Image (cartoon, grey):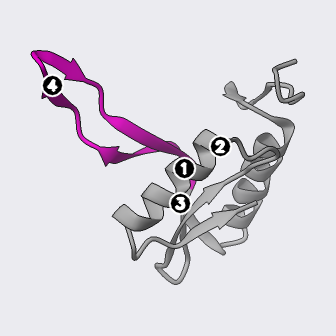
Amino acid sequence: MTKYNNRKVVIDGITFDSQKEGNFYCELKMLRMAGEVKEFSLQVPYELQPKFKCAGKTIRAIKYVADFVVTYADGSTAVIDTKGYKTKEYLLKKKILLYRYPDINFKEI
């Protein structure tokens, strides 16, 4: 059990942070078999701010990692995050993501 009361779950040898994320993965597999989803990727990183140097020290890049990026049969794409609890860090990164990538089709499940 983690600090947000979600349990990690393993499906197809992939460890998901929550049952909700695992269930959505299974749903995507079924939608792909039905032809509604062309393909999907897991844990896709988006750079919000590149690494930089300050006073001789390298400051790490800030990244947002999407749970899923889905390409539908019609060619459209969606960045999908399965959230149970929205932390302050998540809300801030989401805001920066939407600013940095204004044309992104972002969905929360």
Question: In the image, what residue type sits under mark 1?
Answer: Leu
Q: Residues within 10 Å of mark 3 (few under 14, many from 20)?
A: some
The residue to which callout 1 is attached is 92
The residue to which callout 4 is attached is 54
Of the pair 10 and 109, the residue shown nearer to us: 109
Give the residue displayed 44% in from the left and 58% down from the top.
Answer: 97
> Of callouts 3 and 2, which one flags the residue occurring earlier in the amino acid sequence?
3
Kindly identify which numbered label has been placed on residue 39: 3
> Of callouts 4 and 2, which one flags the residue occurring earlier in the amino acid sequence?
4
**Element type at mark 4:** strand
Question: In the image, what residue type sits under mark 3?
Answer: Glu
Question: In the image, what residue type sits under mark 4?
Answer: Cys
Give the residue displayed 40% in from the left and 66% down from the top.
Answer: 99
The residue to which callout 2 is attached is 88
Coordinates of residue 13 in the picture (x, y in percent): 69, 25
The span from disc 3 to disc 2 (Cα, nearest Å) is 31 Å
Tell me, yes or no, if residue 18 can be seen here: yes
Give the residue displayed 45% in from the left and 71% down from the top.
Answer: 104
